[in-house]
Image (cartoon, rainbow, N blue to C red):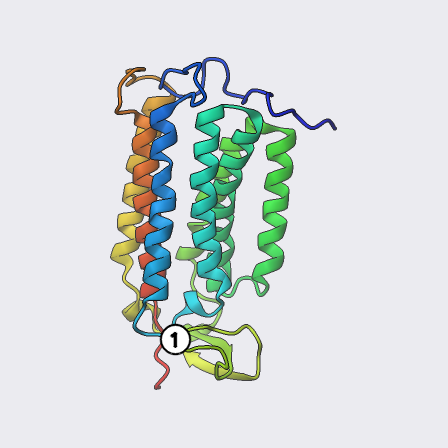
Amino acid sequence: MTFPGIEEPAVCMPDNCFCEIIHEDSIKQPMNTYSSFVFILFAIFILIKFINRKDTSNNFPFYNSIAYPIIYILSLIIIGFGSMYYHSALNFWGQFADVSGMNLLASFLLVYHLKRKKIISNFTIYFIFINSVLSYFLFTYPFLRRYLFGIVLILSLIPLYIPSLKTNFIFKLKYRKPTLPQGFLLNNIEKETEIPMLSTSNTNYNFFWIALFTQVIAFIFWTLDITKIVCEKNSILQGHSIWHILSGVASYYLYLFYESERINLDV
């Protein structure tokens, strides 16, 4: 197995890298490059919202492990910088960085949803395994990149419709009184308590449907752009740029969905 050099072109070259015209400058596709920053912008919004949240009690499943919001935020940042690098250089490693960030987010959604429904017990092992497999195929068979991302993303939706394996919405929340500043949730286990998970009443599913609807609209723009059904190569308004913006919006509303889920600790 040989490693591609920095000048190795992306798989989409020379004529399948979306609609925007490819410039000979240092930034190959300016609009697609600049619009990628929206992922970093929303990551900053989410980080600020996370840090400044008023309710810092440990009755949020998404905050049961500090790793969940951190991975979510880092995935968006990696998508942003990876996409900017990809569209500015259109080389193999830019492509790898771009899709790796997307795979990080898609695999996080899948594994977190499985963990959320108690279908799996160890988040870390499954998350690392799935990303390792995706990275292998992304490097060895890059032409499969979009199909694999789509498959993982679709699979991530299925656990949302599977009843929890714990009856009566009961799950085990393991915690101990934080020794860190209030708001930091610890993975260390000291006491195990059965806690009712009132997800049906406390979760705002409107956020989820907004995120899903927005992502579907984004995919429509992505398809129209990549197939060049709607294409103006020199326009400042590119379908793929709209995909970036709408995908960023969808990721923000998905975060709001996760944040809205609470547990009643008083019953």
Residue 65 in view: yes
Rendered residue at 50%/20% (across/down): 12
Query: In this rendering, is residue 187 above or below 104?
Result: below
Viewer-nearest residue: 26 or 171: 26
What percent of the width, then of the height, locates residue 113? 46, 57
Rendered residue at 47%/41% (across/down): 102
Viewer-nearest residue: 3 or 150: 3
> Residue farthest to the right?
1
Q: What amino acid does circle 1 point to?
A: Asn
Query: In this rendering, is residue 159 above or below 86?
Result: below
* Residue underneath mark 1: 59
Of helix, strand and loop, which one carries label 1?
A: loop
Query: In this rendering, is residue 106 above or below 20?
Result: below
What percent of the width, then of the height, locates residue 88? 45, 26
Rendered residue at 32%/51% (across/down): 252
Viewer-nearest residue: 53 or 125: 53
Query: In this rendering, is residue 236 above or below 247?
Result: above
> On the rendered image, what quadrant is the C terminus found in?
bottom left
What percent of the width, then of the height, locates residue 194? 47, 82
Query: Residue 15's quadrant in the figure?
Result: top left
What percent of the width, then of the height, locates residue 82? 48, 37
